[in-house]
Amino acid sequence: MPRRRLPEFASPTTEELRQRWVEAGPDGLDAVTSRRLIAEVVRLRALIVELDAYAAVVQKVWFQENRSKLVALEKMRVLFSDERGRLGGMSHNPPLAPPDAHRRYP
């Protein structure tokens, strides 16, 4: 049986996530589950931003050496751009590489 796709929906803004975090409070099973889900969404958003930055760096280096675009990285760029657009309020330009990138990935 094929998996059903999630319906299209508007992603909650960071402000909406903060509001839900406060509303959930520290008590009760529902509150713990809500807070864990919110924390996971925030963590994944940060990860997407970091991955996007690294993909942009790899694409830039590839282009400088080969004067062409790497198709897989171009597809990743489009997907990251779409995600930034879904989150609202974020630029469609890729973020800068993290300042400690040279230490983390020599």
Image (cartoon, rainbow, N blue to C red):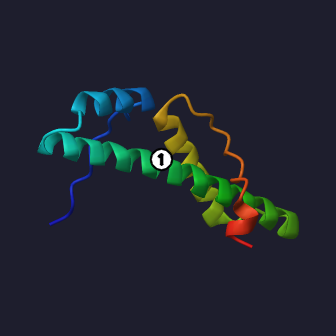
Q: Nearer the viewer, residue 41 or 67?
A: 41
Residue 69 image position (x, y, % from top left): 74, 62
Decide if residue 58 is in sight here.
no
Q: Identify the secondary structure beneath mark 1.
A: helix
The residue lying at 85 percent from left, 64 percent from top is 67
Q: Nearer the viewer, residue 23 or 6?
A: 23
Q: Is residue 11 left or right of residue 62?
A: left
- Considering every residue shown, the one lying at the far bottom of the view is 106
Residue 100 image position (x, y, % from top left): 71, 59
Disc 1 residue type (three-letter)? Arg
Query: The C terminus lies in which quarter of the figure?
Result: bottom right
Question: How many marks are shown on the rendered structure?
Answer: 1
Decide if residue 27 is in sight here.
yes
Q: Which residue is mark 1?
A: 45
The residue lying at 86 percent from left, 69 percent from top is 65
Q: Is residue 17 left or right of residue 85?
A: left
Residue 47 image position (x, y, % from top left): 51, 54
Query: Compared to 74, does 37 lie above or below?
Result: above
Query: The N terminus lies in which quarter of the figure?
Result: bottom left
The residue lying at 72 percent from left, 48 percent from top is 96
Q: Nearer the viewer, residue 62 or 48?
A: 48
Quarter of the rendering containing residue 57: bottom right
The residue lying at 66 percent from left, 53 percent from top is 53
Mark 1 residue crowding within 10 angstroms, few (<14) / some (14–19) / many (20+): some
Q: Is residue 43 left or right of residue 106?
A: left
Residue 5 image position (x, y, % from top left): 26, 52
